[in-house]
Amino acid sequence: MLAVCDENVLGKSVSEGDLELEVKESFYKDEKCDSRKILRLSREATIINAVGKNIVGILIDEGFVDSKMVLKIQGLPMAQMVRI
């Protein structure tokens, strides 16, 4: 499993209606990666959990995530991918 977020949303909490998202450091923070490493890890991952405009955009551009399936909570994009 790959959990990845934009650095500027780490530690942020958002909610909208019944939806709540907390970008917890304990879940998302491990090491800083550039887009090249994230793409390599994404190719190996069976599950991806991504939060943030930049990282979700990269995953859409590379075909890991369908833009129509991105959830936005207070404008913050979140996407999940499962490879079977």
Image (tube, rainbow, N blue to C red):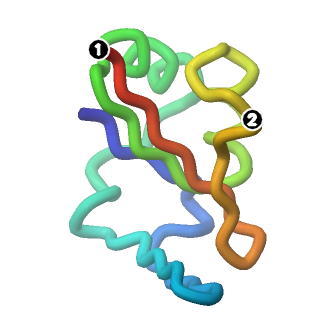
In this rendering, position of residue 15 left or right of residue 58: left
- Would you call the spot at circle 1 few (<14 residues within 10 Å), some (14-19), or many (20 or more)? few
Indicate the position of residue 22 as horizontal and vertical percent values: 42, 77
To which residue does mark 2 refer? 67
Residue for point 77% across, 70% down: 75
**Where is 24 relative to 41, above or below?**
below
In this rendering, position of residue 41 left or right of residue 10: left
Q: Quadrant of the N terminus?
A: top left
Q: Label 2 is placed on what type of residue?
A: Ser
Q: Look at the numbered discs 1 and 2 and tell me whether their residues touch, using CB distance below 8 Å.
A: no
Q: Nearer the viewer, residue 53 or 37?
A: 53
Indicate the position of residue 62 as horizontal and vertical percent values: 67, 15
Secondary element type, mark 1 = loop
In this rendering, position of residue 78 left or right of residue 44: right
Write down the quadrant of residue 42 in the picture.
top left
Residue 84: mark: 1
Q: Quadrant of the C terminus?
A: top left
Residue for point 66% across, 72% down: 73
Measured in 3D between alpha carbons, the distance from the residue under mark 1 to the one under mark 2, in whole angstroms, is 19 Å
Residue for point 54% across, 54% down: 51
Write down the quadrant of residue 66 in the picture.
top right
Secondary element type, mark 2 = helix
**Where is 38 relative to 21, above or below?**
above
Q: Label 1 is placed on what type of residue?
A: Ile
Q: Nearer the viewer, residue 32 or 51?
A: 51
Indicate the position of residue 31 as horizontal and vertical percent values: 33, 45
Q: Nearer the viewer, residue 42 or 70?
A: 70
Q: Nearer the viewer, residue 27 or 68?
A: 68
